[in-house]
Image: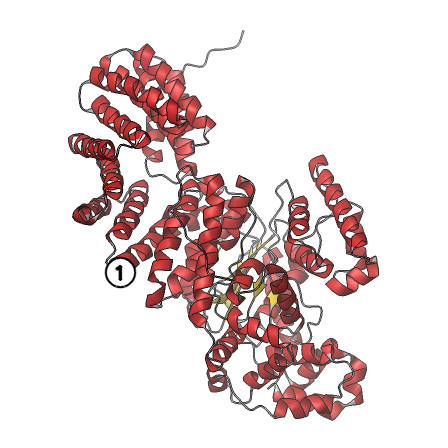
Amino acid sequence: MTGAPGGSPEVEMDKGMFGGLLREARQRSLLTLESLAEASGVSVRAISDMERGRSLPRQATLGDLLDALELEEDERRRLVRASARRTRRVPRQLPPDLTAFRGRAQALAAVHGLTARVAGQGGHVVISAIGGMAGVGKTALAVHWAHQVADRFPDGQLYVNLRGFEAEARPLDPGEALGGFLRALEVPSGDIPAGVQERSALFRERSASRRLIVVLDNARDADQVRPLLPAAPGCLTIITSRNRLSGLAATEGASLVSLDVWSREEAIAALAARIGEERCAAEPAAAAELVALCGCLPLAVAVVGAQLNAAPAMPLRTGVRELSETRWRLDALSAADGRVDVRAVFSWSYRALTPATARFFRYLAVHPGPAVSAEAAASLGGVETVQARRHLRELTAASLLTRDTEGRYVLHDLVRAYGAELLEQEKEDRLGAEMRLLDYLRHNARAANRFVWRFPSVPAGDPAPGVARVTIDDREEALEWYRQEEATAAAALRTLHDARLLRHRIDLTLEWVAYNSVTGRWAEEISASRIGLDAALALDDPVAVARTAAHLSRALVETGGIDEADDLLGLIMRQMHRLPPQEQLQAERHASRIRHHQQRHAEGLRHARNSLALARALAEPYEIARALAIVAYFLSVHGDPKEAVATCEEVIPLLRETGNRHDEAATRRHMGYAWQRAGDLTAAVEHYRAALRLYQEVLDDYNVADVLDHLAAAQLEQGDTDQARVNWTRSADLFDALRVARAGQIRARAEALPRPETRPAG
């Protein structure tokens, strides 16, 4: 599907640029419009509209086109960047509708009756829960229904796979799902609160005046769903689950729709939609036996149809014979319904794969997240990304994979379970695949951090052979890579439990601190750092314990958890005698920061002086300058302000020699505070403004907000109430964007100031 034509001149320019690049790529590949359409599954008209600058593709459509063109990675990246829309639109998150959707007449009649209630008197919120066994087509029905009625909901569609029944992963946290919804509703990442309740409240607020479809797919239970329900009149919420979710009917008034397997007639019609009416009509008995072997389960019929479609000359009776030869059963499914032999269906599809793709499929089952990128898949399989894309196309053609709206690849949980069984049967190196995935997430994060983080990463060593490396050239690409893989990183940390991966989990946790910090993902950082700290304690690695505990305590401080941060500081201090001098220096520096947040300035000054002594013992000029700057800060808030100024004047030339504008900005801030304490407000404001300019140059929003807080306090002492209010408000806005707890206190200061009297005009 493609985006609608029309839009701003900027979007028109984007469309024209993308269209020209697409046409050039097609012509270089010696493909006509018709041959590209056939290879990609995208219509001739849609491709023509794109090439003429009338539309831009969705991510899944773009992936299909680029795969069919078989472009090199650099060309792919140019087209992906050219396709990016520069303006916000209503969310269109629904997966593509099945062109081969058949049957379900009774269920569709029931759900369309529910849709009519939305437009009825009072505009009720409709919540429908579609239940049924795995593979029965719950998602297909929900998506088909949503597409049919999408025009009645002009404010868009939201979709999330809640992963309620994946064998090796916990269900998706409602807070994570809400984060995706809020971003789709144009809430900046930094404005999204940390807690589930707060995110739920903000989601209801942002959806209050909209007519939306919300599809909550594969829900575990009612508790997972409730925070995700909009409360606005005119919204339609569709939930799918293997559980019946009777609690939603009782408390939320949900309508329950139960799905069983297809009838024999529906299953044959669905098979005919995939392989052709004439083929089924020519061998009606064989067609009936094929769907019977599938137990009339929609997922099984889809897989068999894909295989038969790939072999158009094969008689259906041959398919019956081959499918009958394998009588394995997927245990969980056979327990639910003994008529269904899905393992046999998957086996038939699997045996039709080329050997290399079959091996790739087995490793793909290791992926713990809801959707896998081509680069992560390549790392799991230990192959080049170009080769991985070929395997992914073959698996998609065999209906063993689908694509989501972002162009990533999705395994149905039954298919994943089957692949995991094969991996075990073949005695493949599962641990090696898990290591490659963790290395992929860590080493590419390290490359991204060159553009998003001012601190150097810990030396990484070499990744395992076969790990895909992503080319990242700027901050935008770095953040986009992080966004693409954030669900995979979280799932990998939660689910890859082998004790031999403890070091990999620690390293991954430490490398992703940068992204979580600069985007204000404090809740996610707390979760990840807890996992990293547990791994460090299990290995009894004092350096890893100190580092992970420091990152965890910092995230807790930013979200108001100062008491637990104090306990973690005690843990760090107990490691001191086991740490090398450089790590002792970092630990003392971190301790001074925690004491700063606790306003225990005497202790903070002691830790700062300890760090200075360690820096001088190491004879590292940069570390000496940083330590002096921190000492200067504590002198400015607790000691002699004149000594603080003198210390700052000693630090600034050292910092200029090292070229570190960030620490120079911090020292200017400390000088400002020292002069403020000394009573020279003019000098204080001058230094605060210098610090502000430097922090803005290095794109450090956190410290920009902090300096604005200090600057506003000095301006209030000068009697400039209006400017103090402006700067406190700016500070609170920035801290809100980073989800920092002190934002509320600063906003309260701004709002408490008297406002100027309104004078009549004239």
Instruction: Give the camera-side residue of 647 and 68.
Output: 647
Vertical arrangement, residue 171 with respect to residue 235, above or below: below
- Tell me if residue 450 comes above or below residue 364 in the rendering: above
State whether residue 220 appears in this view.
no
* Image height of 262 relative to 437, above or below: below
Q: Position of residue 340 (x, y in %)?
A: 56, 86
Residue visible at 81% across and 56% down in the picture: 45
Q: How is the image coloured?
A: secondary structure
In the rendered image of this protein, does residue 289 appear above or below residue 731? below
- Give the left or right position of residue 350, taking residue 753 as reference: right
Q: Quadrant of the C terminus?
A: top right
Residue sitting at x 33%, y 39%:
741
* Direction top: furthest residue: 762
Q: Is residue 319 left or right of residue 367?
A: right
Looking at the rendered structure, the secondary structure element under dot 1 is helix
Q: Nearer the viewer, residue 397 or 522?
A: 397
Q: How many marks?
A: 1
Asked if residue 661 lies left or right of residue 365, the reply is left
Q: Which residue is mark 1?
A: 539
Q: Is residue 530 visible?
A: yes
Q: Pinpoint residue 90: horizontal percent, then vertical percent.
A: 61, 47
Q: Quadrant of the N terminus?
A: bottom right
Instruction: State the residue in front, 414 or 201.
Output: 414
The spot of residue 528 in percent (x, y) is 36, 54
Residue 658: x and y, percent? 38, 27
Say which residue appears at 63% left-offset and 45% top-offset: 89
Q: Amino acid at mark 1?
A: Leu
**The quarter of the displayed image where residue 168 is located:** bottom left
- Answer with the quarter of the image where residue 214 lies: bottom right
